[in-house]
Image (cartoon, rainbow, N blue to C red):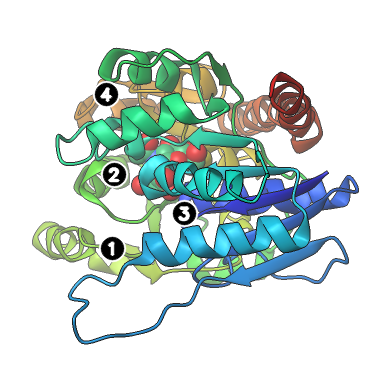
Amino acid sequence: MKIGIVCYPTFGGSGVVATELGKALANNGHQVHFITYSQPARLDFFSENLFYHEVSMAQYPLFDFPPYETALASKMVDVVRFEKLDLLHVHYAIPHASVAFLAKQILKTYGIDIPVVTTLHGTDITLVGKDKSFSPVVTFSINQSDGVTTVSDNLKEQTLQYFEVAKDIQVIPNFIDLKRFSNKNHEHFKKAIAPNNERILVHTSNFRKVKRVEDVVRIFDQVNKVIPSKLLMVGDGPERRNAEELARDLGICDVIRFLGKQDAIEEILSISDLFLMPSGSESFGLAALEAMACKVPVISSNTGGLPELNKQGFSGYLSDIGDIDDMAKNAIHILKDDDTLAEFKANALVRAHDFELSKIVPHYEEFYSKVVESL
Ligand code: GMT
């Protein structure tokens, strides 16, 4: 098939899933056209089946808010017509699903009925989408999509709870490329971070409020008092400053490293012993799956889609949102001796195998065929 993928090109989970899906589809022989405002962060290699179309727009002093949606719709129309695409797959409802609706209507005037698949990723429903300033358009555009998927059962339930959706929703969980994400031997790096064989805890996110990064620091503080440890904080965002200030207040700056945004996240995960994800909301938790693939067990909250990923007492533990004491207690249980840690590490990888790319991507291919046939 010739597939157009529209996504955010940044480090966010939805953009990562969209890019990894496009790469996997290209590998399976499909022609994949990314349509977005800059090169997706993980579109970092050449393939004869991968194309990138940049959405650029004319500047004009009148535009206090540059009309990205208009430029994106025009680009979608152009790429569908001239590359003769069979299907458009848009990731993250806002604004991609409504822009796809507009592009679809314009394309009808050229005698083209392009099928549109929308994948809902989480905050486009749970945090932003249900806000009154967006919800009428989100509801409309979900219902107008020819196919809708969510990344977990929980996100499907939340979509049906918050929006009047008449469409069937197909759940297709996120996936992981185990060739890229695997535990690599980086003993020298581990030694540099933890010279006295301290345990290494890690958190990766966009440091937004929903990630509860201060909880990460507090959990770590409790663990470090019992088991000498180091904490790696990977990523950047609005809450980083608060987390750094808390680390200073607690007097633990010397055992915490804020690494900022990193490309080779799998290398950092490879030297880590435990992943912390105390989020206030998480539709799936792709970052936790990436950790599991690198044999890193997960301490998480029990919100959203996380119980569908992290298995209690097997790949890690889940606690109520904000229950720092319980999370710290569970972390200490996993880290307390080498045998327990080795068992949880092995289990984390076993769990990651359930979401291996080759098991999940065919579900998208089947879904595309179903949508195309239904038109
Ligand atoms: O977590 C974020 O803030 C980024 C966000 C996104 O849309 O880029 O991630 C969402 O989509 C990911 C990929 O499907 C999921 O793994 C994350 O759980 C989800 N984040 C939330 O629901 C908060």
Amino acid bearing label 4:
Asp
Amino acid bearing label 1:
Gly
Residue mark closest to the camera, 2 vs 3? 2
Is residue 280 visible to the viewer in this orientation of the structure? Answer: no
Give the residue at mark 1. Answer: 237
Amino acid bearing label 3:
Glu
Sequence order check: which comes first, mark 4 or mark 2?
2
* Crowd class of label 2 (few under 14; some 14 to 19; many from 20; radius 10 Å): many
The reply to whether the C-beta atoms of the residues labelled 1 and 4 are less than 8 Å apart is no
Sequence order check: which comes first, mark 1 or mark 4?
1
- Some atom of ligand 1 lies within 8 Å of the CB belonging to the residue at label 2: yes
Residue mark closest to the camera, 1 vs 4? 1
Amino acid bearing label 2:
Lys
Is residue 148 visible to the viewer in this orientation of the structure? Answer: yes
Give the residue at mark 4. Answer: 326
Ligand 1: image quarter: top left
Q: Secondary structure at mark 1?
A: loop
Q: Is residue 96 above or below residue 318?
A: below
Q: Is residue 342 left or right of residue 206?
A: right
